[in-house]
């Protein structure tokens, strides 16, 4: 190769040409590598760096396959099956179960020897659940339908279906705080006569049983009191019986209440219609991205579109949860 003098015009041109061909060659090598990786993935082989919990890499001839890592695989199987059957009610229960079994991540950076909550959250991602059933599923990479992989499954597809049903029925992770306790329906309507705070309801533990009480929650109130639920409920019923409402007032109130209900139902129907329209628009945009991903061979474009697809998918999930909780 002739020496290049970057201080001359010809030298700068030659240097730029060499740089262009070098970048072109590196890009071709990268594309060949990604295409080979995609082909291996479609054949059912695990092609990523990390290894999911409960598995380990094993060399079999020229191929590297995943095999079960005991006792991790058994503990994860038990946790997922107990969640599917309802024995473990929430993701937090799964976390505590695996923590008791001293399950940790496969990452070499985990030097604490403890399980992290994000590992349990990853267990309930759709692609992870299908993976533990022996399938590959990557919507971000254009794999919309699960297909059989080479690694041995931990759980069955029946368990997968039950897990998805439970996730759809209870999308909130952890214990849900109940604002209105049905055991104490009067606590939001009655106030302390001294500090004017709302009363609270609680179960007081006795020698042989628990007993319901209403009381003032202000610990600084010198006149703080507690009263049995039965006594306060009876006094409240007597108070209601003494109240009389004229018939014309009842009729007007019924009309107002009916009008309010109709308006509320109409507002809710319009709100749901708008949310469904948002979901349709997101589906349309995600479908366009999928078409481009299937036909594209540009690594940078694929990476950018996968990120955009994931953002749209998160928006769609958020809107669906808003509709479910309405």
Image: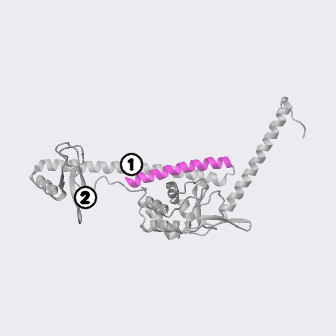
Q: Nearer the viewer, residue 81 or 36?
A: 81
Quadrant location of residue 53? bottom right
- Name the side, left or right, on which 219 lies relative to 44: left
Nearest-to-viewer mark from 2 and 1? 2
Q: Secondary structure at mark 1?
A: helix
Is the image coloured rainbow, by chain, by secondary structure, or in one colour?
A: one colour
Q: Give the residue at mark 1.
A: 271
Please report the residue visible at 53 percent of the width from the left and 49 percent of the height from the top: 312
The disc at residue 130 is none
- Residue 164: image x %, image y %? 47, 63
- Residue 187: image x %, image y %? 23, 51
Q: Is residue 23 above or below residue 237?
A: above
Q: Nearer the viewer, residue 182 or 68?
A: 68
Q: Is residue 165 above or below residue 254?
A: below
Q: Give the residue at mark 2.
A: 203
- Residue 266: image x %, image y %? 33, 49
Q: Count neighbours of disc 1 (C-alpha within 10 A) and say few if under 14, some if 14 to 19, many if 20 or more.
A: some
Q: Is residue 321 magenta?
A: yes
- Residue 301: image x %, image y %? 65, 47
Q: Is residue 319 magenta?
A: yes
Magenta-drawn segment: 299-326
């Amino acid at each position: 190769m002739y020496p290049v003098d970057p201080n001359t015009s010809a030298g700068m041109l030659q240097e730029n040409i060499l740089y262009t061909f070098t970048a072109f060659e590196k890009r071709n090598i990268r594309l060949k590598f990604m295409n080979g990786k995609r082909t291996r993935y479609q054949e059912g082989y695990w092609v990523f760096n990390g290894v999911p919990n409960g598995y380990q890499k094993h060399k079999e001839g020229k191929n590297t396959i995943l095999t079960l890592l005991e006792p991790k695989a058994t503990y994860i199987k038990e946790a997922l099956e107990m969640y599917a059957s309802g024995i473990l009610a929430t993701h937090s229960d799964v976390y505590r179960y695996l923590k008791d079994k001293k399950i940790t991540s496969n990452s070499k950076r985990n030097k604490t020897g403890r399980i992290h909550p994000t590992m349990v959250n990853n267990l309930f991602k759709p692609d992870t659940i299908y993976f533990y059933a022996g399938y590959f599923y990557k919507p971000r990479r254009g794999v919309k339908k699960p297909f059989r992989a080479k690694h041995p499954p931990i759980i069955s597809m029946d368990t997968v279906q039950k897990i998805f049903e439970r996730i759809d029925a209870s999308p909130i992770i952890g214990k849900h705080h109940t604002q209105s306790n049905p055991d104490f329906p009067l606590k939001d309507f009655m106030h302390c006569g001294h500090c004017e705070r709302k009363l609270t309801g609680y179960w007081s533990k006795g020698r042989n049983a628990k007993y319901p009480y209403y009381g003032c929650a202000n610990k600084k109130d010198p006149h703080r009191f507690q009263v049995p639920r039965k006594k306060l409920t009876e006094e409240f019923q007597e108070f209601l019986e003494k109240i009389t409402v004229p018939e014309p007032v009842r009729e007007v109130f019924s009309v107002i209440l009916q009008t309010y209900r109709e308006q509320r139902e109409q507002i809710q129907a319009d709100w749901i219609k708008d949310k469904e329209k948002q979901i349709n628009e997101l589906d349309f945009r995600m479908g366009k991205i999928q078409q481009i991903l299937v036909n594209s061979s540009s690594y940078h474009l694929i990476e950018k579109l996968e990120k955009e697809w994931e953002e749209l998918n998160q928006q769609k999930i958020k809107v669906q949860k808003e509709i479910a909780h309405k």
